[in-house]
Structure formats: structure tokens, C-alpha cells
Amino acid sequence: MKEMICIQCPVGCKLIIRKKGEEIYVEGNKCKRGKEYAINELRNPTRILTTTVFIEGGKGKHEMLPVKSDREIPKDLLEHAMKELAGVRVKAPVKCGDIVFKNIANTGVNIIATRDMEEK
Ligand code: SF4
């Protein structure tokens, strides 16, 4: 038996997960998203990556640009993805939603800006 909190919405249901052979049984979920979340967490946990990258030529004192992955990526690739982003330098101007890094950690997922950044 395993317990976890569903993080798919603010309700935060406490999930109880039991495995019998290949079957996974979930209790405590108030909706079907909780069951899907529990099964994904056991089989292939994924997360949206949110972080910042360096930006050059941005207006004001901004040296960092907030970014996120446009889809979830496997949790065990997050560290590798962060290392790839550590060397990234974006040039202003940037619009929210612009792709700043393609195919992070060879996942097919892109990293996009989450705010506009005007040029100096
Ligand atoms: S199981 Fe449904 S209601 Fe409960 S936290 Fe997850 S998404 Fe929200």
C-alpha cells in the first residue's frame, strides 16, 4: 500500500494505492483525475518544469527570464533538463509564449517564456 496527495487541484485528496499484480487500485480520490494521477505517479511520474534562464539586453534590471515547459516531462529527466538550461542565454526582446529552448532533454518538449521582456 502507498499513500500520496493528489496535486491536480487544490482539494488535495489523500490517495491510497494498492497494487495487485499489474492492476492498480486507487481509493480516496473525489474524481477520476486522482486515479489517473496516482497511476501516472507509479508508472511514469511527470512534471511541468518551471525555472528561469539568463536574458541579455532586457529592459530594467532583469537578468533572468521566467520559463516553463510547454508539456510535462518525465520527473527523472528534470535534473538533466535543468543542466541544459543552465547554459542558455536568451536575447531580449521576448514575448510570453516564445520558445527559448527546443526539445529539452530530448523529450520533444519545448521551454517557453512565461512573460514578455522588452529590449533596453
Ligand atoms: S482527486 Fe480530483 S478532487 Fe481530489 S485532489 Fe485530485 S483532482 Fe482534486
Image (cartoon, grey):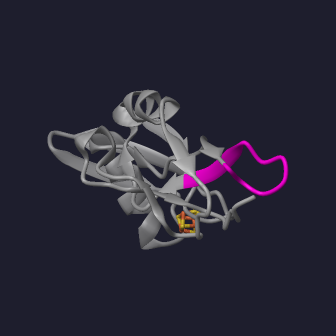
Name the chief secondary structure element in magenta. Answer: loop
Task: Relative to 20, say whether 118 is above or below.
Answer: below
Report whether 87 appears left or right of 59: left
Instruction: Name the foreground residue: 89 vs 106.
Output: 89
* Span colored in magenta: 57-67
Instruction: Name the foreground residue: 7 vs 103.
Output: 103
Asked whether residue 6 is in view, the answer is: no
Residue 37 place in picture, x, y as percent: 41, 56
Magenta stretch containing residue 45, yes or no? Answer: no
Residue 32 place in picture, x, y as percent: 42, 71
Asked whether residue 76 is in view, the answer is: yes
Report whether 106 appears left or right of 8: left
Residue at image coords 25%, 47%: 107
| Outermost right residue | 60
Residue 110 place in picture, x, y as percent: 37, 56
Magenta stretch containing residue 58, yes or no? Answer: yes
**Quarter placement of the C terminus:** bottom right
Residue at image coords 69%, 44%: 64
Instruction: Name the foreground residue: 86 vs 109.
Output: 86
Report whether 5 appears left or right of 18: right
Residue at image coords 51%, 39%: 3
Q: Quadrant of residue 33?
A: bottom left
Q: Quadrant of residue 60?
A: bottom right
**Quarter placement of the N terminus:** top left
| Outermost left residue | 22
